[in-house]
Image (cartoon, rainbow, N blue to C red):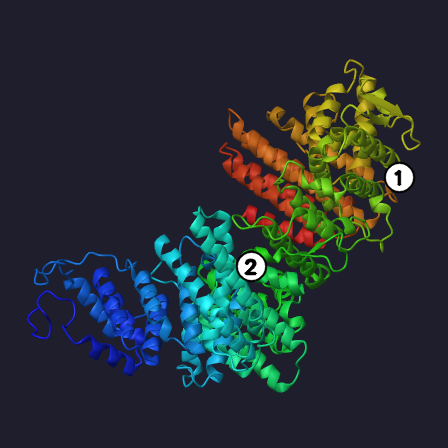
Amino acid sequence: WKDDGFFSVGAMIPDVNHTVLFELVKALEAPRLFVQLLLALPPAVCREQLENLVEYISSETSPSDIRFFLDVWWEVMKHREGQEDATVSAFSALIHQHGAEPSLEDGLQPPKRFKGDPGNPPGLPMVLLEGLKQIRGSIAQTRPRCYALANLAELLCLSSGLGPGDRDSPLPITEHLAKLSALVSLWSSDTDSQYHPCGLGEKVREADRSMSLLPLIKPSREELFGGLELLCTLLQAWGEELQDTLRGSEDLCFESCRLLDTLATLGKNLDFLLETGDLGEDETQVVLELTQLTKDFLRDTSAILKDLDTSLVSSVAMEIIAQRLDRHVDTCSVFASEKTWAFSKAWVECLVKNKVLFQNPELVLKLLETLVNFATSHHDKEAQELEMQVIKAIVECYTELSLSDKNKVISSVLASWGGPGLSQNVQVVREGFQEDLNVTLNQITKSVSDEGLTRAVASMARLTLLSPEATVKQVCHLAVVNLGAHQFLAQILCSFPSLSFLESHEDPGRPHSLVVRCLQEAVWEKLSTTREEEQFLQFLSFLMQPGSATPLVSPVEVTKAFVLPYLKSDSPQIELSLQILSKVLGIPSCSEDHWIKSCHPFPLLLSLCRLLDGYTKYWHQPREQLFPSLETKDLILSILCQLCELVGPETVPSSELWVQSLAWLHRKVASLDWTVGLRLKKLYGDYFKNEVPATLFEICRLPEDEWTSQSWPAYGPGSGLLAWMECCCVSPELRDTMLALLTINVDNPEEVNLFSKGFLVALIQVLPWCSHGEWKRLAPVVEQLLQRQVLHVPYTLEYVHHMPLLNLRPFACHLQLSVLFLRGFQLLCSSSCSTWLPPEAWLHVVQLYCASLTDLLASIKATAGAASEPCAQEVSFTCIQVFCHLLHVAAMLPAGDCGEPLLVVALEVLSQYEVSSRADTSPCAALSRANEGHFLESITDNVGHEELRSTLLQKLSKLGA
């Protein structure tokens, strides 16, 4: 470009006739392009060219000159970098690349690199003010006068020294849209406006520029007060005439409205300047005078702005959104929530085309609220078609949100419309939703994997948005009936902490968990198999402890929903409720106050105690009456123990209330079986002594500061051992205490003999009522008494044909224990006890016996393994004896379903015998095996139970082979 003859050497622009240039720009009506090119120049050159313009229009000023000057001024204030077209951008780049500031002395100096800041060209306001001063005498018409005053007032408002910076805080978006709408309406009705023929899009774009001033020029203090004086002079000269014209004019124009609006802003800024500015006397006089002039001018004209037409506001808003103009984000918020605009075809079309702008949780929620509002009052087919389009668009926006934002939306949906969500009010959501739900969740349950989790969560998010309650219920149902899917589905649900929503519509004072209610209604009383109950329990456990995720339900909610209402012996859900209670008690508390405090711990303890008391009458309950099984007794005991650990003085508000609560519980438990109170010792502490039958004191040295005797009719003379044995069943600690405090004079044969007989009777009395856990605690008592040789169990030779020349001392206790069990069953099956146990109790007794034999076999094996010398023959002998005793017991039992457990243990005994007999390496081992085999077969042949006999004979034949 330096070599181009069109340019002067070292000059920034062609040395062309400015008259031609300005006339050309005027003719083309291109003030915006002119300003863009002007502001691309270095500051000094820019000012120089603006001075040339002022000089030109000041000579023989015509109306078109005035209009052109005011347009340039207005465009200078509206200019924003980054909005230039390609031509201006290229010119600007060229200037920045090769620009030079010509010397004031020599225009032919070599070009200098331009490093100036075009962001604030110095002195431009002064040039503009000077131009206005020079042409003000030529401005005679109302419109250009309004235009000139508006430009001047606007320029002054931009001064950094004037006003509290209101322009940094934009207008509320509704006011902003109303103003834009008014501008567009003015241009549409004003045939003299240059924007009158433009389309709506262009009008909105230009109105947006006029409302969003981020100017590149800010007047200095000197320019500010020069401008204030000028405005003061012009208002004095033109004000009265303009007021009359504006009051009497029916057809408003953009310039007059802009003047009124800008003067109102300026008036506020002047008040601020008076309060906070450090003004000289002359400056104060100018500001006071201008303030009064402004107030006088606006007094009778400001009402005009209130009558402006804002009917196009919705169309303007949609154009702002479509063109992504300034404040389009704020406009989206109004668009989404303004009910009067919603669901016109233009509104729906705008939403669908610009849905990418609505991928925000707040906007999605506002759209949903607008949708529900529309759907509740419009039910025709056309409305439903529009609703479908809108729902599809909203769901697409929602799908693009992050998971945390989706949870925000779901939380708000639940807060606004409760569990049913959108489906409650929007019919098109309900239509086909169930089918969609079934298909989607079936696909989810078929893709159980870590990779499938993300996709599953995304699908669940969509369903949950539309109908949270229905979705959660279906997930709960599938978690129970789909084998192995419960943990995966729980993981999915726990991805939505928003579902831990508390409903309060039934009882505002006691909100309930949505998820818990869904579990209750969809699953709780519909569990039909043990497997379903197990999956429900595991599913519930994961919802309470989902690892790194937020728990969806709390132990308190679960306890109040699934435990407290069902702790009654006749409740069908009692056993599952107890399993749930055991699970929740294992969950640590998140705060200093344990959660159990809010679940009525003392009534809960009493309910468990009453259940335990019911087991004292277990075998005499009417058959048709529901009662938890004996297997559940161990669970109740475990829960009671957990509760006694957790419930302490800190769970009640005061120590006084703690003592009162303990006293209340003690009083209630006093009417129950005495052993129940012993189980509460950890809770009672030193407040209450252990209350036991008086007969227990006859056989134990019980310290009176811890124990107290009571007289109960059921515990007459000779019942001390029974009470002692019942104490042994309570806990390992109490069992050890009882063994330590037991008093028997082993030097008195009669006392030992009476004790041994009484022990057998007490054992038989306790056995049927023991749970498996209690029997496990009692078995070591027998073993220890046998080892201490306090319990005398003579070993008879009824199943020994020849004296075994073996060392049976290591196995003496095993043989005695087996005989003790045999003697017990002989007593239990005797005529004196024939009506004592109902038929259904025998299976339980046999199961306990078989469990003890299994433990006995393990002990025999361990003893043999620890022996210093081979003892295969001794083990074989012991196994044969145990086998014979077992078959003897089987022969005595009443007819029933006890064969299976006996058969299993009998086969275990034979298997252990087989191992030991094969380990025997003595010279006569083969003969011994043959003799023993014949003996075992002869014993087995006498068994009356057909299945037991045939299976055992088959096993023995294999051993013989």
Q: Quadrant of residue 59?
A: bottom left
Residue 805 in the image: state x and y as whole percent: 61, 26
In screen coordinates, is 765 left or right of 203? right
Q: Quadrant of residue 244?
A: bottom right
Taking the spot 34% from the left edge, 64% from the top edge, the residue there is: 129
Give whichever of discs 2 and 1 has the lower sequence position. 2
Please rate how many residues cluster around mark 2, counting C-alpha atoms within 10 Å: few if below 14, some from 14 to 19, many from 20: some
- Residue sitting at the far top: 747
Question: In percent of the image, x 70 and y 27: which residue is there?
Answer: 733
Judge by depth and name the residue closer to the eye, 132 or 675. Answer: 132
Element at label 1: helix
Distance between mark 2 and mark 1 Cα atoms:
74 Å
Q: Which residue is mark 2?
A: 408
Please name whichever residue, 217 or 952, is drawn nearer the observer in this view of the structure: 217
Percent of width and height locating residue 349 = 49, 80
Is disc 1 surrounded by few (<14), some (14 to 19) or many (20+) residues within 10 Å?
Answer: few
Q: Which residue is mark 1?
A: 832
